[in-house]
Image: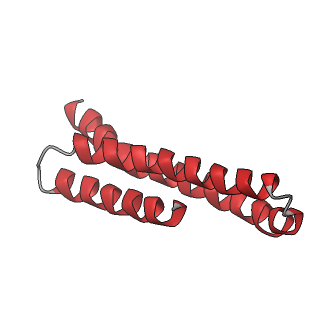
Amino acid sequence: MWLLLGLIAIVATIINLYMYKTGKDYKLAMAMGLSFTALTLCAEHSLVSDWVKGEDWSALMDVVPTMEKAVWFLTIVSILLNIVPILLELKGKK
């Protein structure tokens, strides 16, 4: 599930940037990109929670340390890419 939500977040972010570049209203796409990023994080947390409930310690030890870095990085990138149009608009108004 987290993979599907992550792919939707990426597509929404690309649409956000495309709509800004073409001069269309991009705010809905921006909200969708950020929302699906949040849903991806929730789905990832649910996956880890299932591993804890199932006491699958080997999965936790193998996956969580690597995924932690990836989740932090991709979340920061998603936030930055989704707010780029707002920052560029603010820069253009000065």
Given residues 28 and 23, the one toward you in this image is 28
Which residue is depicted at the point 64% across and 51% down? 46
Residue located at (46% from left, 46% from top): 79
Establish if 32 lies above or below 8. Answer: above
Asked whether the viewer can see residue 36, the reply is yes
- Left of 70 or right of it: where is 59? right
Tell me residue 63's x, y (percent).
Answer: 76, 67
**Image quarter (top left, top right, bottom left or bottom right) of the C terminus:** top left
Q: Is residue 27 above or below residue 2?
A: above
Name the quadrant containing residue 48: bottom right
Looking at the image, residue 91 lies above or below residue 26 = above
Q: Is residue 23 left or right of residue 47?
A: left
Image coordinates of residue 1 in percent, x first then y, are: 51, 62
Q: Residue furthest front?
A: 54
Q: How many marks?
A: 0
The x, y position of residue 71, in whole percent, is 62, 56
**Quadrant of the rendered structure where residue 61 is?**
bottom right
Q: Residue furthest top?
A: 94
Please tell me whether residue 33 is drawn above or below residue 2 in the rendered image.
above
Picture residue at 40% right of the left edge, 57% below the top: 9
Q: Residue at x 36, y 50 (%)?
A: 33
What kind of colouring is applied to the model shown?
secondary structure
Q: Is there any visible trace of residue 84 in the rendered image? A: no
